[in-house]
Image: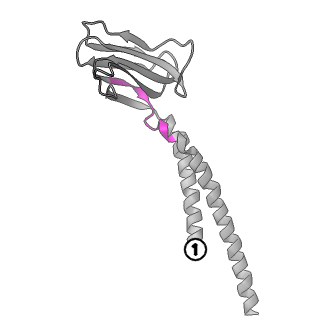
Amino acid sequence: MHRLKAIGFILVIMGIMIIFMSTVLPLVKLPQTFIETGPKVELNEDISYWIDTYILPPIDADTPFSVDLEGAHPGGLTIAILPSRDGEVIAGSSPLLTDVFDPTRQRLSTSTTAPMSSEYTIFIVSIRNNFSIRINSIWSPFYNLRVYLYFGIGALPAGLLVLYYERMMEGQRRVIREALKS
């Protein structure tokens, strides 16, 4: 039954590691670049516009933020970058960026700082136009690891329970061996 003890130790170690990774690593923030092309559908006679939405991990207030948006041809693009919480735009908050391309404009390149610490939701409306966007700022590349916290919280007590059960069974086997010897 040493296999059961090994499974218990593995579950405990994995639980501790997952809890550590899902709570500490999302706090590490590094320079990141977000690159995307769109729209996510092919525009044709039936679909003349599309709204693409992207969510950036939390960015601290006063962090430098640069945006480069380029359309395949002039006009037909609108961009809004708004502070959000859990994917929902924060009502009454000031946007990081809003811009509507006029019919002669094909490219937007701007730098600013984040007005508040939060996630940021990017909305791009493309009307008969393809685009590519590049955003540079500082955020955690490990932000999505936080969802694994619950697996760690589950693995740790499961491993402890397996170890406890193994210890009880070992004691029971010892008592049976001693009873058989006498």
Q: Residue furthest front?
A: 46
- Disc 1, SS: helix
Question: For the point 45% across and 14% down, which residue is it?
Answer: 96
Q: Residues within 10 Å of mark 1 (few under 14, many from 20)?
A: few
Question: For the point 61% across and 52% down, which residue is it?
Answer: 154
Q: Residue furthest bottom?
A: 182
Q: Determine whether, in the image, residue 31 is placed left or right of residue 75.
A: right
Q: How is the image coloured?
A: one colour
Q: Considering only vertical position in the picture, is 57 above or below 79? A: below
Q: Residue furthest left?
A: 73
Q: How many numbered discs, if any? A: 1
Which of these two is toward me, 124 or 177? 124
Amino acid type indicated by mark 1: His
Q: Quadrant of residue 67?
A: top left
Question: For the point 54% across and 61% down, which residue is it?
Answer: 10
Residue 114 pos. (x, y %) = 46, 17
Residue 159 pos. (x, y %) = 61, 60
Look at mark 1 in the image and give the residue it sits on: 2
Q: Quadrant of residue 134?
A: top left
- Inspect the magenta stretch and tell me whether residue 141 lies in it: yes
Question: In which quadrant is the C terminus drawn?
Answer: bottom right
Q: Quadrant of residue 166?
A: bottom right
Residue 66 pos. (x, y %) = 36, 19
Question: For the point 41% across and 11% down, which residue is it?
Answer: 98
Which of these two is toward me, 22 or 128? 128
Which of these two is toward me, 15 or 88? 88
Q: Considering only vertical position in the picture, is 152 above or below 52? A: below
Question: In which quadrant is the N terminus drawn?
Answer: bottom right
**Over which residues does the magenta segment extend?**
134-145
- Inspect the magenta stretch and tell me whether residue 137 lies in it: yes
Q: Considering only vertical position in the picture, is 5 above or below 98? A: below
